[in-house]
Image: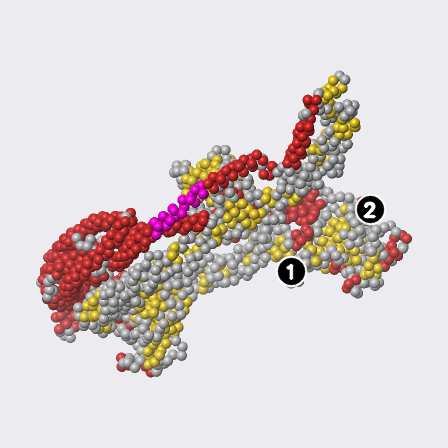
């Protein structure tokens, strides 16, 4: 930035600097393009961090403006010090040298008048540029008394190198002589580098060069260029460096190689290097008057410098680019591993070769001559170059190293070969163990460091014993033998720990010599070295301690826990699960709404209720439940079970748990040794535990839990929890809060705390989360890992198992599930203990609870009162006993509204009918809320007139009679009858246009179209005499728009003034090519209108579709359908749209839509034109009343009035007209002129011109109203010459009006010009002579004719002058039109007179007929119609109510059928699972116990199948009860058309029932077969013994059982196939439905005939009444049928209940069998393990014995003899000790080793035999216990009663009959048919009403006409 700041003031210098920078950049460009450069281009970055890839380059110093601020350290001085102005003489006057002289004062003591040396280098920091407004000023010639001289010295204190021109900017005129010197030794010596002189001749003569050459670029020259007088200020003196560089850069300044070569081969760089620069000012600029010594001249001779600019770089020997300030000095920022102020030496550790300055060559990188690092292996900080060795020698080696390169170790250390030489720890201390070395020698080898060891001692440091020995340090240097028990060591190792002697025991073995099992392990492997002690596998929670019996492995169980591992609960006991403390929201104390619902997998919940919470609601849990707590204070993890519907999750909840008092019911004796007992509890907490629950997700059955957050609860206190619904976030649905679960903090349980696998711990945490969520609870419970984890954790927390405590009434047996404790409940009963009815059931009895069957629409929830069974009815839904809409007592299930209410189908309760007492026929309304209304009255409540009627009263309403063209609809005000008019329409009946509009039309959305009048009028009416004009064109010659080829443009006939087409249409035919469909959307612009500078596009809310079939597209020309493309969001007004129509310049029709084209043809537009006969056929042409004063006229005020014109030819049609400019020479005032050109059309005779401004040449001016003398006959063409015959006239002047000359009467001359004889005279050679007396008689008559001719001519001229034909048309045309109008008027008058004569009689006859017709309508048809309507309405209401119940019944039956068909596949799946289970058992279980296990599984599957069948029967019976209850709702709506179908459908479903019965019987038989097979299996178990033969038989039996399972699968498939007739029955039902539809269609046709037979309307209405009566009779009959049906249903229910009892007993026995099976299975598991172990032990013992016999073969006999001999010797040991010693030495010693081994093996074999015997005893005991259990199981199975198949068959038959009966009703079709009939009758009634209204209107019009004619 410092460099480029100079560019603002000197672009040439800037350009040179840029070239220089490019030079530097090119020099440092890498030869390898992949190298990445750092800012300091002296070197590259290492590639991939490898320092060997660094490439060095010579560093060129960066060009800097060194006198700029903060760039370099320098001092600037002026000598002598008094050379600065104002120092000795103050103030000193100084004047400028030049034409315009200015003077100022200098005073160094006054800062404002001082000009110090610092002004030569000061900077304007605001623009980062030298301050050229300040300058240093020297003393003048006047002050110094001679030539003023001064020396300016800039000292830098270090070497720099000039990189660009040195420039000096003078504020004064540049001096005549100036010298620049440099110093490289801080000013000690100086060398001149440049002379500046006004005349260099003298210097040149002394050897100073005139110019620089490439041969000597460092030569000193003299320049005359910078010593001239101009400019007077701002001139520069420049020492050019760049010119010297240019000598080598070439013409293009790009030859950098030559430049760098010159840097090396010449002294150019040395010449430009300096520490100081000196500017010597020798002689100032003068004007040559200094010799005169004039003071006024001498004050103008001085020096003034405003800026000195030096661009240079630090000289760092080509090892650095920059200098930096360090310790008050500028020093180089060295690279190349160099150091020093000028990088003149290497860094201390980089002297591997001598230091050298960098070089410029070779180009482009130069020679960096970087310093190289010495190879000291990081053990020395410096080195010194050794010329003898040729490399650097390390100065001081550290870290115990030595050598020229620190690559050797000091004595007492050795080199660690595993470490690199540069590692700080490569030299390691020997550290020999003094107890293990010979002769206390502590030295070691230099390589490897091995010490000199004693015998049996090893290791580098001689610090360990040999393998098999230990105790070097323990026994004072003597190693001892290990003596490990190799049966207990890993790999039979006898190598122990070298210090402690500990042998390497197997994981389950302990002691120093590995001879004992560890705690938690048992069964030491006495015989097999490959085995280990067996882990106890005690359940972490079920066992009291983790250890077991080290012989048998039996764990110590907690109370009521059993099994080898203590993982099973005892009979009638269970292990609770995580949610045992499931706290439900309290019914009181909260603001959330408590509710309930049926159990559903999609919306699960616990217990019987839940609450719904909205924002700011609160749920309370009090007191918090804790079933069991092992300690006084225990930690619990709160969890929330919830559900949420909607699209957004709930944001946050706040849970607070507070202690609220002591727990007085706690038994503290249960906690005798609890450490917390000494501390009294604090049962009133100052602050509750607060937990923030966030981000509750969407869905039901969810749970929130933070498994890492727990709270302590004291058993001595009671607690209350509150849940606040703070922030729902975006959730809009209420939150379902199910329960607050207090989970015991399982983190401290052994199963979790002792688990070291973090993955398994995460799985445990996941088990907790998934178990709490009800959606995944059951799946989690069956997961093997989760189930075992929860059982272990909860058995520890509960300190064992808990008693089942099943409810004796609600449970099937006292046994419960061993995990969770769920008892087996009776039907409809729930709770862990089976202690209450489940939702949807009531009345708990020993046989179960009764279903509620609440109506899904009428009941608030499907859950009824658990005692009475009353469902919670919605508001105004009838409770049991209340009168309902059928006028009958209602039931428990909320099926009906209370009387005079409706709307049960809404599911929101019922509403009052509130039928109007005035307009309704009854107080009871239909289910829709519609009351039965009088004719002309409507509304749900019959409280308002029908549309088109008003004046609501008890007698009905009056017809509105609104105009169909002007009214929005047919309705009117209920009181006044005023209609609702369109926007531009008014009048009571909307039959008149508002002011400013006209032509009321039905197709106009505004009613009347606005007046256009070109804005010159506000009122108008329809113009007469116009007919329709359709403008049509084929588009053949239409062309694409030039500016948009998507459109084509209309031909000329559609353009221009088309405002007559307002409100009409523009249309065209369009089609696409085959297969293409074009959709013209609302965003498309299919038509564009242009005119009056506007562009309108058609828009429509409806899409238009164009296909290959020609389609007519029509576009309404009304502003509502168009937009202004310039402002599409602003609605168009009519005036703007009119303006476009009035000046069409272009119509564009779109032909391309995307990539598809449409063909446009036959474009038409509707308009109007004058009719030929003057008749009026259309009314949409306006006739405006033009505003006065605007001088406009025409139908639309679009023309100027006569005598007026447009102000300019380009004036708008929408502005006023101005009078014609015809002066005073027009025939009228104002004159008549052309409307647009202003050319006058009625100039007065004698004048002409555009404005009548000129007179003809023979007419006098300025009035142009008189002929000149001797001229006459002033006319449009001027005057005519008199042309009097001079010889026969009295004068040349004639009469100016007639042109008659004054003839010489004496000569009897006559004629107009006196050119003939007078009248009655004849020309002769002698003159004019008389014709005779007879001709004198006609003279008088001829004079009269001439007078008449003159008068007629005058009149004609007057008419011509006043002619207005240009405006009104030719006169003959107007005359003919007037004659035609008169003739038409006469004809009309004649016809009117004739009609008037006959009209009174016709009106009288019409009135009589109308009166009679009205009476007939009122007295006959209307009552009958009302009766029929009421009857139909009543039937409709009844059928609608029946339809609702039928829908419900149909849905129930469909669900029953669906369940029936779904059960079969499920049963098949169960049997398939059975086969899979058997196969799994076959491969995974060995031993004879497989028989028992498989038999139990088969037995369980059989029981499940029986339970499934029984459940299906129960479900069917429940559906039957539901159906029977719903059937009661149909008792008033059934008709006689439905009865014949009952028998046929009953037979069909009877057949289905028989087939179902057969399937059930087959399933029962299969169950009995399975039962028999199970009995056989149990019998075989009782005689079970272990033998190989039994094993083979067991496999065969398993195969037989698998075959039996396959057979049962086939039977199931057959049973599933047997359900196919059900589908056939459904098809039969469809056929019967079609027949019924035909019958109903016939009835509809009969009813439709009513609309065409008005004469028999009375009979038809009577038939409708009879039909209603017949319906009532049938309903009564149906009541009787339903009564019997209720009895049948009760019988069915009784049988179903009996079946349920039987099924429940089967379930009880099945559960008992299952429990017994579980017990047997647990017993067998132990037996199997024991027997297997026994077999293994026996086999291993035998194998090892054989092995020992083979090994010891030759010594066997000797061993036996020695044993006998040893016994003899021992009996008499004292007396034969000598003999024993001898024999020990001679015989026993050689055999000692083999004998010891044999004895040890013999002892181990005896131990194994004892263990096998004990195991066999255990197996025998277990088998005996198993036999007892099997006997008990057999007895229980034999006590199972036989299933009553007849009851099930009867039940199925009843269900089938009910299904058949209701399917046959097919009431939906009947209802639809009746609705169609009602619709047809209403259509006929409405048609009659409209006919009547039309007749009334005709009467009214005729009456009005009659009144008009009379007047």
* Residue 199 badge: 2
Please name the residue shown 40% across and 55% down the image. Answer: 960
Q: Is residue 497 visible?
A: no
Depth order, front residue of 790/1391: 1391
Disc 2 to disc 1, C-alpha distance: 43 Å
Q: Which of marks 2 and 1 is nearer the N terminus?
A: 2
Name the mark on residue 325.
1
Q: In this view, does 366 lie above or below 1571?
A: above
Q: In the picture provided, is 198 more to the left or to the right than 1339?
A: right
Q: Which mark is residue 486?
A: none
What range is drawn magenta here?
Answer: 1391-1411
**Which residue occupies 68% across, 31% down?**
1347
Instruction: Indicate whether 1792 appears above or below 236.
Output: below
> Between residues 147 and 528, which one lies in front from this camera angle?
147
Identify the residue shown where x is 18% and y is 54%.
Answer: 1539
Q: Which of 1855 and 1278 is in front in this view?
A: 1278
The question of residue 976 being in magenta is answered with no
Q: Which residue lies furthest to the right in this view?
A: 292
């Amino acid at each position: 930035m410092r460099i480029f700041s100079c560019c603002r003031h000197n672009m040439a210098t800037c350009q040179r600097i840029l070239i220089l920078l490019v030079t530097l950049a090119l020099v440092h460009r890498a030869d390898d393009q992949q190298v990445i450069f750092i800012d300091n281009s002296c070197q590259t970055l290492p590639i991939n961090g490898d320092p060997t890839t660094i490439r060095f380059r010579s560093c060129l110093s960066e060009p800097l403006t060194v006198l700029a601020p903060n760039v370099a350290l320098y001092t600037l001085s002026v000598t002598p010090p008094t050379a600065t102005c104002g120092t000795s003489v103050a103030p000193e006057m100084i004047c400028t040298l030049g034409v315009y002289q200015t003077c100022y004062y200098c005073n160094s003591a006054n800062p404002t008048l001082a000009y110090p040396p610092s002004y030569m280098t000061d900077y304007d920091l605001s623009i980062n540029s030298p301050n050229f407004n300040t300058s240093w000023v020297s003393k003048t010639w006047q002050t110094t008394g001679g030539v003023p001289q001064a020396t300016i010295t800039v000292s830098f204190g270090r070497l720099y190198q000039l990189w660009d021109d040195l420039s000096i900017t003078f504020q004064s005129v540049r001096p005549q002589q100036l010298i620049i010197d440099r110093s490289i030794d801080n000013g000690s010596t100086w060398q001149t580098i440049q002379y500046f002189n006004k005349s260099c001749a003298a210097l040149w003569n002394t050897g100073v060069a005139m110019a620089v050459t490439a041969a000597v670029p460092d030569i000193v020259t003299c320049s005359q260029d910078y010593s001239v007088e101009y400019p007077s200020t701002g001139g520069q003196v420049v020492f050019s460096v760049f010119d010297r560089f240019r000598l080598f850069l070439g013409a293009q300044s790009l030859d950098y190689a030559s430049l760098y070569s010159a840097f090396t081969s010449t002294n150019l760089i040395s010449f430009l290097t300096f520490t100081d620069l000196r500017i010597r000012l020798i002689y100032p600029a003068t004007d040559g008057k200094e010799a005169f010594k004039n003071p006024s001249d001498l004050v103008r001779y001085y020096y003034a410098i405003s800026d000195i600019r030096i661009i240079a770089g630090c000289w760092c020997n080509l090892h650095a680019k920059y200098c930096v300030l360090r310790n008050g000095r500028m020093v180089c920022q060295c690279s190349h591993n160099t150091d020093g102020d000028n990088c003149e030496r290497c860094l201390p550790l980089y002297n591997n070769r001598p230091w050298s300055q960098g070089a410029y060559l070779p180009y482009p990188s130069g020679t960096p001559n970087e310093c190289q690092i010495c190879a000291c292996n990081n053990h020395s900080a410096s080195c010194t170059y050794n010329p003898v060795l040729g490399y650097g020698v390390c100065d001081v080696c550290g870290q115990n190293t030595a050598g020229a390169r620190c690559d050797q170790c000091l004595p007492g250390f050795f080199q660690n070969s595993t470490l690199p030489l540069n590692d700080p720890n490569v030299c390691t201390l020997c550290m020999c163990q003094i107890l293990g070395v010979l002769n206390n020698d502590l030295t070691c080898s230099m390589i490897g460091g091995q010490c000199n060891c004693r015998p049996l001692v090893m290791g580098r440091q001689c610090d360990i014993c040999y393998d098999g020995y230990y105790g070097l340090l323990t026994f004072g240097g003597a190693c001892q033998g290990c003596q490990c028990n190799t049966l207990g060591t890993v790999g039979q190792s006898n190598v122990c720990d070298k210090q402690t002697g500990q042998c390497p025991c197997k994981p389950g073995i302990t002691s120093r010599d590995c001879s004992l099992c560890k705690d938690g392990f048992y069964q030491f492997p006495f015989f097999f070295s490959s085995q280990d002690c067996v882990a106890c596998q005690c359940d972490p929670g079920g066992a009291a301690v983790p250890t077991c019996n080290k012989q048998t492995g039996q764990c110590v169980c907690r109370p009521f826990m059993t099994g080898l591992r203590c993982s099973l609960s005892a009979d009638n006991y269970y292990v609770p699960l995580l949610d045992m403390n499931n706290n439900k929201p309290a019914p009181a104390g909260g603001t959330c709404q408590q509710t309930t619902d049926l159990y559903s997998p999609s919306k699960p919940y616990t217990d019987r209720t839940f609450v719904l919470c909205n924002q700011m609601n609160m749920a309370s849990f009090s007191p918090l439940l804790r079933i069991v707590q092992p300690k006084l204070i225990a930690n619990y993890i709160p969890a929330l079970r919830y559900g949420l519907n909607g699209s957004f999750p709930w944001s946050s909840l706040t849970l607070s748990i507070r202690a609220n008092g002591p727990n007085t019911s706690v038994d503290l004796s249960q906690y005798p040794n609890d450490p917390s007992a000494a501390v009294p509890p604090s049962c009133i907490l100052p602050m509750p535990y607060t937990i923030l629950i966030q981000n509750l997700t969407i869905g039901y059955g969810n749970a929130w839990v933070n498994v890492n957050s727990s709270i302590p609860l004291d058993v001595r206190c009671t607690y209350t929890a509150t849940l606040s619904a703070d922030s729902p976030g975006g959730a809009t649905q209420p939150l379902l809060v199910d329960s607050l679960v207090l989970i015991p903090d399982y983190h401290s349980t052994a199963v979790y705390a002792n688990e070291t696998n973090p993955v398994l711990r995460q799985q445990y945490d996941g088990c907790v989360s998934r178990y709490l969520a009800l959606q995944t609870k059951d799946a989690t419970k069956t997961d093997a890992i989760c189930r075992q984890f929860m059982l272990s954790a909860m058995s520890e927390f509960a300190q064992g198992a808990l008693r089942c405590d099943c409810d004796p009434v609600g449970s099937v047996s006292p046994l419960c599930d061993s995990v969770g404790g769920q008892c087996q409940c009776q039907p409809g009963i729930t709770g862990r203990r089976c202690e209450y009815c489940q939702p949807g059931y009531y009345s708990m009895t020993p046989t179960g609870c009764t279903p509620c069957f609440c109506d899904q629409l009428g009941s608030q929830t499907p859950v009824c009162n658990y005692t009475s069974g009353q469902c919670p009815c919605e508001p105004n839904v009838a409770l049991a006993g209340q009168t309902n809409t059928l006028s009958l007592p209602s039931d428990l299930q909320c099926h009906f509204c209370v009387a005079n209410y409706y709307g049960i189908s809404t599911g929101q309760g019922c509403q009052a009918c509130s039928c109007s007492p005035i307009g309704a026929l009854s107080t009871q309304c239909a289910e829709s809320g519609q009351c039965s209304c009088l004719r002309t009255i409507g509304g749900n409540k019959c409280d308002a007139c029908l549309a088109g009627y008003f004046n609501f009263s008890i007698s009905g309403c009056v017809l509105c009679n609104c105009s169909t063209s002007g009214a929005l609809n047919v309705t009117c005000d209920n009181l006044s009858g005023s209609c609702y008019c369109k926007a531009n329409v008014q009048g009571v009946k909307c039959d008149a246009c508002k002011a400013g509009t006209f032509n009321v039309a039905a197709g106009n959305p505004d009613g009347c179209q606005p007046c256009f009048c070109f804005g010159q009028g506000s009122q108008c009416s329809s113009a007469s005499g116009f007919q329709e004009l359709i403008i049509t064109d084929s588009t053949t010659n239409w062309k694409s728009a030039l500016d948009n080829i998507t459109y084509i443009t209309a031909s000329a006939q559609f353009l221009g003034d088309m405002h007559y087409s307002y409100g009409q249409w523009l249309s065209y035919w369009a089609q696409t090519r085959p297969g293409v469909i074009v959709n013209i959307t609302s965003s498309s612009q299919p038509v564009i209108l242009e005119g009056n500078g506007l562009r309108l596009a058609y828009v429509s809310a409806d899409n238009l579709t164009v296909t290959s079939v020609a389609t007519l597209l029509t576009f309404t020309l009304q502003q509502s359908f168009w937009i202004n493309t310039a402002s599409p969001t602003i609605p168009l007004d009519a005036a703007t749209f009119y303006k476009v129509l009035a000046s069409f310049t272009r119509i564009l029709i779109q032909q391309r839509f995307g990539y598809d084209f449409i063909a446009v043809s036959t474009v038409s537009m509707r308009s109007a034109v004058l009719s030929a006969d003057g008749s009026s056929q259309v009314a949409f042409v306006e006739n405006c009343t033009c505003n006065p004063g605007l001088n406009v006229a025409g139908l639309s005020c679009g023309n100027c009035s006569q005598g007026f014109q447009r102000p300019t030819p380009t004036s708008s049609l929408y502005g006023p007209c101005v009078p014609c400019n015809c002066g005073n020479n027009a025939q009228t005032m104002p004159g008549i002129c052309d409307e647009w050109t202003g050319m006058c059309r009625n100039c007065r005779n004698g004048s002409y011109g555009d404005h009548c401004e000129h007179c003809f040449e023979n007419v006098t001016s300025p009035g142009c109203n008189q002929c000149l003398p001797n001229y006459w006959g002033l006319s449009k063409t001027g005057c005519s010459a008199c042309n009097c015959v001079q010889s026969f006239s009295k004068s040349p002047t004639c009469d100016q009006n007639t042109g008659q000359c004054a003839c010489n009467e004496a000569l009897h001359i006559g004629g107009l010009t006196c050119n003939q004889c007078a009248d009655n005279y004849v020309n002769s050679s002698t003159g004019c002579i008389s014709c005779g007396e007879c001709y004198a008689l006609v003279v008088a008559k001829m004079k009269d004719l001439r007078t008449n001719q003159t008068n007629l001519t005058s009149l004609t001229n007057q008419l011509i002058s006043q002619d207005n034909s240009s405006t009104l048309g030719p006169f003959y045309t107007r005359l003919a039109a007037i004659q035609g109008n008169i003739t038409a008027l006469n004809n009309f008058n004649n016809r009117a007179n004739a009609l008037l004569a006959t009209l009174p009689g016709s009106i009288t006859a019409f009135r009589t007929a109308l009166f009679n017709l009205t009476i007939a309508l009122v007295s006959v048809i209307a009552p009958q119609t009302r009766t029929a309507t009421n009857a139909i309405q009543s039937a409709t209401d009844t059928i609608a109510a029946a339809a609702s119940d039928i829908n419900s019944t149909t849905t129930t039956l469909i669900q029953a059928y669906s369940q029936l068909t779904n059960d079969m596949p499920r049963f098949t799946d169960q049997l398939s699972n059975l086969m899979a289970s058997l196969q799994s058992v076959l491969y995974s279980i060995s031993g004879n116990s497989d028989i028992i296990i498989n038999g139990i599984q088969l037995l369980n599957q059989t029981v499940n199948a029986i339970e499934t069948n029984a459940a299906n029967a129960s479900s069917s019976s429940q559906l039957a009860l539901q159906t029977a209850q719903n059937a009661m709702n149909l008792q008033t709506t059934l008709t006689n058309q439905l009865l014949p179908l009952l028998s046929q459908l009953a037979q069909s479903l009877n057949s289905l029932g028989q087939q179902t019965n057969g399937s059930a019987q087959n399933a029962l038989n299969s169950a009995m077969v399975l039962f028999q097979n199970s009995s056989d299996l149990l019998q075989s178990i009782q005689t079970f013994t272990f033998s190989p033969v039994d094993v083979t038989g067991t496999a065969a039996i398993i195969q037989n059982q698998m075959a039996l399972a396959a057979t049962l699968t086939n039977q199931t498939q057959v049973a599933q196939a047997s359900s196919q007739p059900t589908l056939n029955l459904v098809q039969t039902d469809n056929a019967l439905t079609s027949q019924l539809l035909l019958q109903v269609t016939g009835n509809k046709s009969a009813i439709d005939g009513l609309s065409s037979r008005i004469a028999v309307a009375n009979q038809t209405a009577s038939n409708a009444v009879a039909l209603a009566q017949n319906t009532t009779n049938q309903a009564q009959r149906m009541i009787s049928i339903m009564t019997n049906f209720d009895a049948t249903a009760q019988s069915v229910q009784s049988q179903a209940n009996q079946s349920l009892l039987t099924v429940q007993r089967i379930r009880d026995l099945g559960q008992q069998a299952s429990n017994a099976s579980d017990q047997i299975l647990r017993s067998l598991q132990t037996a199997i393990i024991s027997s297997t172990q026994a077999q293994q032990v026996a086999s291993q013992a035998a194998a090892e014995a054989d092995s020992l016999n083979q090994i010891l073969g030759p010594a066997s006999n000797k061993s036996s003899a020695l044993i006998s001999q040893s016994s003899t010797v021992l009996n008499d040991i004292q007396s034969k000790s000598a003999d024993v010693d001898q024999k020990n030495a001679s015989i026993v010693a050689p055999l000692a080793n083999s004998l010891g081994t044999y004895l040890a093996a013999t002892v181990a074999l005896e131990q194994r035999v004892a263990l096998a015997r004990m195991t066999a005893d255990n197996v025998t005991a277990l088998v005996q216990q198993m036999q007892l259990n099997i006997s008990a199981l057999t007895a229980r199975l034999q006590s199972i009663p036989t299933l009553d198949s007849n009851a099930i068959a009867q039940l199925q038959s009843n269900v089938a009959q009910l299904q058949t009966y209701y399917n046959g009703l097919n009431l939906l079709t009947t209802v639809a048919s009746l609705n169609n009939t009602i619709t047809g009758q209403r259509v006929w009634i409405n048609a009659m009403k409209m006919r009547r209204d039309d007749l009334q209107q005709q009467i009214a019009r005729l009456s009005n006409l009659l009144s008009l004619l009379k007047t």
